[in-house]
Image (spheres, rainbow, N blue to C red):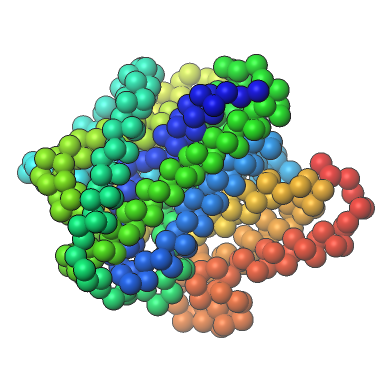
């Protein structure tokens, strides 16, 4: 049986794995742009930034394997390719973004240095920690996350009760969809697939419980982590909306977060938050780089040189990409997210469902259909939008970048009806 203390510790550890300082800049921006429609964007944001990641943890509780196990029913080749794509995205987008967030929140407001200098020093530190595998990060994580939560909670509560009485009109035509798609940028669904596997490995090493005990522990920990994310995201979206009249129309994500901290906690609170955000970003970057390097090391029969080379290349990419503005990195991430997120969401849901309804053929058909109908969402960034108008008119929700949803559901139902009882569940 799992003790309450063990559940709380595991839940808090899981929350720490999800919680990245970069995610803090997204909800206030969303709330500010939503204005009076903040509740709708909150619901949409919850779906992709809280609910889907939570289901990812439930999937890990069910299969208790690694990221590779999420797609192995399709084929070993596809699963390997999927893992490569996931880690490639992680090391080229969210990892460099942590350096960019650090520069804009913790460096630029206080020092007149270039972003290239910041990203260079930043990823030199990441390189040293990733190569040496220092345990300092473990201690930083244990004490850093609670302090950040206290600071963010203070901003949320003070902000809600001291905000202006006026809320600006929203700029979104479809607030729910805007919130849902902005949730992609948290990378939380990807994080669920990655960190869930890390959690399973850790539990296998450190506990002697049964499969069922571990399943219950992971599930309860997922609930705790999900509630923590829900509180922070909802609170920051509300604050962005409640203080929306205080920001310019074109205010950036980091500007809004910095502004909220100043309005609520003053300059001292802002300075403190800057340092904590920088450290949180740093631990996130080290985790991504080391996790990716561990995966590559495994592909090359645990070759230590493969680990070192991957760390070096990851840090070089971090320097080159991390020097750009946060908004730019978010923009260039969109095509990759439109490509990988629908597949990831479908894989998470299929792994949560009863194996009776998720045979090999179901996995293959649903993922193929999902990929096919998400292609227009990916192509819109590379071809003229008018060329996709006909497709978007035919496919329901395609104009909202959700054209894959109904085909995925339809293919799941039809495939199960056609192949029901003809093949045992795997």
Name the residue at 64% across, 28% down.
214
Q: Looking at the picture, tell me which residue is in the foreground, 123 or 194.
A: 194
Residue 199 visible? The answer is: yes
| Quadrant in which the N terminus appears | top right
Name of the residue lying farthest toward the right? 422
Is 79 rendered above or below residue 3?
Answer: below
Rendered image quadrant of residue 118: top left
Write the residue at 70% across / 22% down: 210
Q: Is residue 15 left or right of residue 147?
A: right
Residue 44: percent from the left, percent from the top?
Answer: 47, 63
**The image quarter in which residue 119 lies:** top left
59 with respect to 8 (left or right): right
Residue 229 shown left or right of residue 223 in the figure:
left
The residue lying at 74 percent from left, 64 percent from top is: 411
Count every numbered label the image shows and give the total: 0
Task: Give the percent coordinates (x, y) of residue 131.
Answer: 37, 20
Depth check, front residue: 99 or 379 = 99
Going by the image, does 189 lie left or right of 343?
A: left
Residue 51 screen position, x and y as percent: 54, 52
Looking at the picture, how far across and down is residue 77, in whole percent? 67, 41
The quadrant in which the C terminus is found is top right
Question: What residue is drawn where x is 81% and y is 61%?
Answer: 415
Q: Is residue 137 visible?
A: no
Classify 281 as above or below 309: below
- Examine the rendered structure and indicate whether residue 46 appears above or below residue 386: above
**Location of residue 101 with respect to 279 vertically, above or below:** below
């Amino acid at each position: 049986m799992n003790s309450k203390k063990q559940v709380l510790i595991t839940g808090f550890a899981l929350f720490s794995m999800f919680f990245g300082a970069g995610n803090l800049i997204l909800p206030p921006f969303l709330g500010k742009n939503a204005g009076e429609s903040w509740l709708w964007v909150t619901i949409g944001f919850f779906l992709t930034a809280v609910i889907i990641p939570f289901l990812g943890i439930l999937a890990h509780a069910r299969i208790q394997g690694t990221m590779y196990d999420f797609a192995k029913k399709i084929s070993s080749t596809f699963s390997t390719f999927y893992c490569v794509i996931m880690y490639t995205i992680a090391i080229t987008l969210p990892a460099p973004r942590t350096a960019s967030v650090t520069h804009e929140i913790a460096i630029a407001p206080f020092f007149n240095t270039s972003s290239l200098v910041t990203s260079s020093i930043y990823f030199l530190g990441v390189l040293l920690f990733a190569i040496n595998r220092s345990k300092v990060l473990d201690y930083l994580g244990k004490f850093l996350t609670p302090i950040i939560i206290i600071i963010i909670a203070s901003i949320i509560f003070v902000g809600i009760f001291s905000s202006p009485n006026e809320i600006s009109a929203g700029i979104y035509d479809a607030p729910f969809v805007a919130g849902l798609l902005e949730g992609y940028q948290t990378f939380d669904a990807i994080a669920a697939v990655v960190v869930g596997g890390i959690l399973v490995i850790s539990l296998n090493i450190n506990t002697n419980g049964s499969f069922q005990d571990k399943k219950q522990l992971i599930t309860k920990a997922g609930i705790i982590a999900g509630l923590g994310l829900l509180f922070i995201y909802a609170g920051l979206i509300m604050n962005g909306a409640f203080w929306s009249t205080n920001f310019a129309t074109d205010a950036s994500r980091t500007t809004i977060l910095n502004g909220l901290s100043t309005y609520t906690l003053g300059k001292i609170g802002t300075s403190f938050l800057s340092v904590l955000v920088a450290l949180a970003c740093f631990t996130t970057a080290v985790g991504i780089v080391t996790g990716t390097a561990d995966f590559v090391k495994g592909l090359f029969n645990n070759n230590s040189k493969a680990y070192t080379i991957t760390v070096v290349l990851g840090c070089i990419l971090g320097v080159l990409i991390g020097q750009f503005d946060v908004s730019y990195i978010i923009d260039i991430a969109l095509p990759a997210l439109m490509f990988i997120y629908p597949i990831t969401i479908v894989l998470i849901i299929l792994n949560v469902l009863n194996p009776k309804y998720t045979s090999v053929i179901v996995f293959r058909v649903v993922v193929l259909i999902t990929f096919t109908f998400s292609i227009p969402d990916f192509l819109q960034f590379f071809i003229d939008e008018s060329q996709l108008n006909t497709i978007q008119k035919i496919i329901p929700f395609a104009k909202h970048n959700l054209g894959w949803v109904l085909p995925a559901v339809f293919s799941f139902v039809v495939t199960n009806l056609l192949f029901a009882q003809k093949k045992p569940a795997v």
